[in-house]
Image (spheres, helix red, strand yellow):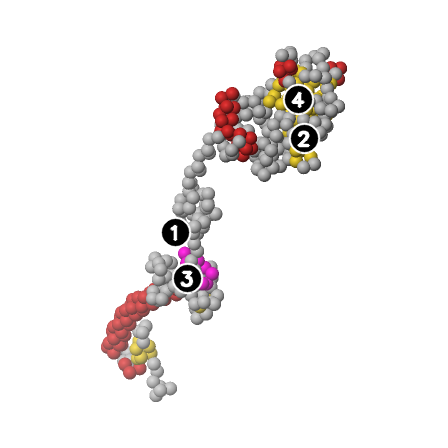
């Protein structure tokens, strides 16, 4: 490649073969592809529509499949991290085929970016070949730089995603001297081994400590008594009050109390006729209808006791009357016998006591003076 740029021709068309023979030259060509693939592609184009080869090639659409790439659209860019050769100047050459679109044409720019972010660019908008040269003294303490190719302007034809005059993509060639090549990408850190999934916790056993048929995890009354007959879905005692007197049926001695009556703690109303609380004794036998063995009412017990005592005294009086009456009658008969004996004795005596003046008595004969003697 001759010295340049030329005032008339610019950089001209570089002959990359002159660079390939040198040492430390890195080359990238977007259009590079396998020779067999390249010939198959050419034959495909030449078999396309059109009477002349140029028309056949123009009518064929190619998206760059099989080539090295990349092919840039407007606003896109691609870059490489290049390792520097210590003590050597860095030279970068970019070449691409510009397509005219009215008053403008395609434009790719090449830049050298230092690690601190400093950018050195060509910015030659009218050139299909651009070059950058940086003295090695600018790279003291720097081990690598970034070479970037950016599509500042790429025309848009009638077809999207294809190359050629009627497409919207553009390829390029890039030669870099003074580099040891592309810096290898750091190997990605191995992904940490996934932590073993924790073993699922065993499902809690369905425990029912109070034995009411509702498990403890939903039991709102976990200490239900074993005497409870029925519980609800939350494990709590179902309280029934059939007569609505405020006393649960299980504690209600009078389960049929009428509504609105004042009842005691066992659900029975006040009976003013006896001055005590009623019991559930519809049969009047002194026992609760629900429990024949229930103890009698205290009033009933007192009345029964009084009857027994009265009966005892009646029997005792009857026995006394019978026994004492018989003794008195016997004593009377004995006295009567004595009186008769006394009278007989007096009548037989010489005194000549008038029997008419003797008045019998319980203790013996009693002298009674006649009214004539007075």
Residue at the spot of label 4: 13
Question: How far across and how far down the image is residue 267, in percent?
Answer: 44, 61
From the image, state whether disc 1 or disc 2 is nearer to you: 2
Q: Is residue 251 magenta?
A: yes
Q: Are marks 1 and 3 in contact (CB under 8 Å)?
A: no
Question: How far across and how far down the image is residue 176, in percent?
Answer: 66, 18
Image: 247 above or below 75: below
Q: Are marks 2 and 3 in contact (CB under 8 Å)?
A: no
User: Circle 3 sits in a helix, a strand or a loop, which is it?
Assistant: loop
- The count of marks equals 4
Q: Is residue 41 magenta?
A: no
Binning the other alpha carbons within 10 Å of mark 1 as few (below 14), some (14 to 19) or many (20 upward) gives few
From the image, state whether disc 4 or disc 1 is nearer to you: 4
> Which residue range is magenta in the image?
244-253
Question: How far across and how far down the image is residue 92, in percent?
Answer: 68, 20
Residue at the spot of label 3: 242
User: Circle 4 sits in a helix, a strand or a loop, which is it?
Assistant: loop
Binning the other alpha carbons within 10 Å of mark 2 as few (below 14), some (14 to 19) or many (20 upward) gives many
Image: 53 above or below 246: above
Residue at the spot of label 1: 229
User: Circle 2 sits in a helix, a strand or a loop, which is it?
Assistant: strand
Q: CA distance from mark 1 to mark 3?
A: 16 Å
Q: Are marks 1 and 2 in contact (CB under 8 Å)?
A: no
From the image, state whether disc 2 or disc 4 is nearer to you: 4
**Circle nearer the N terminus (2, 4):** 4
Residue name at image x 71 percent, y 30 percent: 125
Taking the image as shown, residue 172 lies to the left or right of residue 242, namely right
**Circle nearer the N terminus (1, 3):** 1
User: Circle 1 sits in a helix, a strand or a loop, which is it?
Assistant: loop
């Amino acid at each position: 490649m001759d010295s340049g740029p030329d005032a008339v021709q610019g950089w001209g068309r570089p002959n990359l073969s002159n660079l390939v023979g040198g040492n430390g030259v890195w080359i990238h060509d977007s259009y590079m592809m396998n020779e067999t693939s390249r010939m198959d592609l050419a034959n495909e184009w030449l078999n396309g529509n059109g009477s002349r080869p140029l028309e056949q090639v123009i009518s064929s659409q190619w998206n760059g499949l099989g080539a090295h790439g990349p092919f840039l659209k407007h606003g896109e860019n691609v870059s490489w991290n290049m390792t520097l050769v210590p003590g050597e100047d860095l030279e970068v050459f970019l070449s691409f085929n510009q397509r005219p679109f009215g008053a403008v044409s395609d434009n790719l720019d090449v830049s050298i970016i230092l690690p601190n972010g400093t950018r050195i660019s060509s910015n030659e908008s009218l050139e299909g070949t651009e070059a950058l040269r940086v003295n090695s003294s600018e790279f003291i303490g720097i081990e690598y730089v970034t070479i970037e190719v950016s599509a500042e302007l790429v025309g848009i034809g009638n077809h999207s995603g294809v190359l050629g005059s009627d497409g919207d993509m553009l390829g390029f060639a890039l030669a870099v001297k003074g580099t040891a090549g592309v810096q290898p990408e750091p190997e990605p850190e191995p992904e940490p081994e996934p932590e073993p999934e924790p073993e699922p916790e065993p499902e809690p056993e369905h425990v029912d400590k109070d034995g009411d048929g509702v498990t403890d995890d939903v039991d709102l009354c976990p200490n239900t008594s074993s005497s409870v007959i029925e519980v609800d879905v939350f494990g709590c005692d179902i309280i029934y009050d059939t007569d609505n007197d405020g006393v649960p049926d299980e504690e209600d001695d009078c389960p049929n109390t009428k509504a609105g009556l004042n009842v005691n703690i066992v659900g029975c109303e006040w009976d003013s006729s006896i001055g005590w609380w009623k019991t559930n004794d519809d049969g009047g036998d002194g026992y609760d209808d629900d429990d024949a063995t229930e103890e009698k009412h205290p009033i009933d017990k007192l009345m029964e006791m009084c009857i027994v005592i009265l009966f005892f005294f009646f029997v005792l009086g009857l026995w006394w009357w019978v026994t004492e009456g018989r003794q008195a009658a016997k004593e009377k008969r004995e006295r009567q016998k004595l009186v008769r004996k006394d009278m007989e004795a007096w009548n037989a005596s010489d005194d000549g006591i008038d029997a008419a003046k003797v008045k019998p008595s319980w203790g013996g004969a009693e002298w009674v003076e006649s009214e004539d003697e007075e």
